[in-house]
Image (spheres, rainbow, N blue to C red):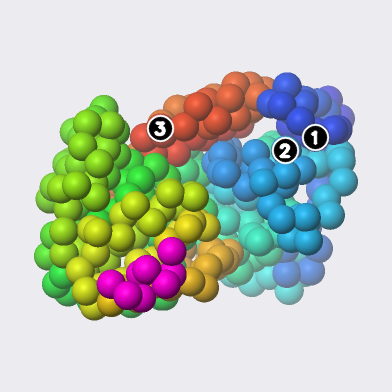
Amino acid sequence: MGTESMYAVRLHSFGEPEVLVHEEVARPAPGPGEVLVRVHAAGVNPPDWYARRAFENFPVELRPAWTPPLILGSDISGTVAAVGSEVATWQVGDEVFGLVNFPGRAAGYAEYAVAPADHLARKPAGLGHVEAAAVPMAGLTAYQFVVKHLRYGPGGTVLVNGAAGGVGHFAVQLLRVAGAEQVIGVASGRHEEFLLGLGVDRFVDYTRTPAEEVVRDADLLLDTVGGPDAHRLLPTVRRGGRIAPVFLGDYRPERAAALGITLNEQMWQVRSSGSDLTELAALLDSGRVRVGIDSVHPLQEAAAAHRRAEQGHLQGKIVLQVTDR
């Protein structure tokens, strides 16, 4: 392989996981305000498989006009390999991680990736690159939801639906850090031990007992699942409580209003932020927040990682390992 090339996973057409091809491509170079990162690991996120399928699950008017060939992936952890002009915050050799160029196109499924300098944070010393690559999108989504948007304070009962997934498992921990009095986690039974270990006070196995049958008077429903039957969870929230959806769902707004429930209908989109990630990194370094890993796959087996993702019922995050470090 030439010195100005690298290996990456690209797609040349949209479709099933098999369209992801491991091949030699040109190595990118950083521009002004940018950093070139030697990627050690890359996180796998829902927008990656949405893009692989040409965003077919989006309304036509909202679909990004991306055309192949494409390198997917916005979550990276690695080492600074070069810096562009106007970059004073990073030096070659620094270990960094970040959610890169989101929302927008990034190219993390590769040996090297370019990132705006302010999208990166210093990798937590206590985490390896695989663990760090699992954090950015899911961790920032939960962090920006709980801390920035909801500004959740001490007290109250919170029901987290989809608590074992990427966003959910970070959310339950951040709610504990914020001082929630009780955190109730909803997931399938195999995740019970995992979630109790993260600080969930009460676990509900939805495969045995629907949450709407056994939970009442939650002050907040943080729903990471959404979907057409999301309204089934309305009975779990007290009058005067609120629902904060992470993904689109049908919560029957008129019925919610009649029940005295505030529905945050405006969808909050996670944003790349090195400063927010630095704050989250401090919580990770302190041990107050931990990262769950569902599975790790070599970069060249990105298709297998996507197949695992589409099976659902994840416990934490899926990561692509790019180097042996």
Residue in the image at 41% along x and 34% along y: 314
Amino acid, disc 2: Arg
Residue in the image at 19% along x and 47% along y: 213
Q: Which residue is mark 2?
A: 52
Q: Which residue is mark 3?
A: 313
Q: Are marks 2 and 1 in contact (CB under 8 Å)?
A: yes
Mark 1 crowd level (few <14, some 14–19, many ≥20, 10 Å Cα): many
Residue 204 in the figure: left or right of residue 285 = left
Amino acid, disc 1: Phe
Tell me, yes or no, whether the highlighted magenta stretch contains residue 11.
no
Q: Are marks 3 and 1 in contact (CB under 8 Å)?
A: no
Q: Separation of disc 3 and disc 2 at Cα?
A: 20 Å
Q: Separation of disc 3 and disc 1 at Cα?
A: 24 Å
The span shown in magenta is 252-259
Image spot of residue 51 (x, y percent): 71, 44
Tell me, yes or no, whether the highlighted magenta stretch contains residue 254.
yes
Image spot of residue 299 (x, y percent): 63, 27
Image spot of residue 68 (x, y percent): 87, 41
Mark 3 crowd level (few <14, some 14–19, many ≥20, 10 Å Cα): some
Of 212 and 17, which appears nearest the observer? 212
Quarter of the image with the N terminus is: top right
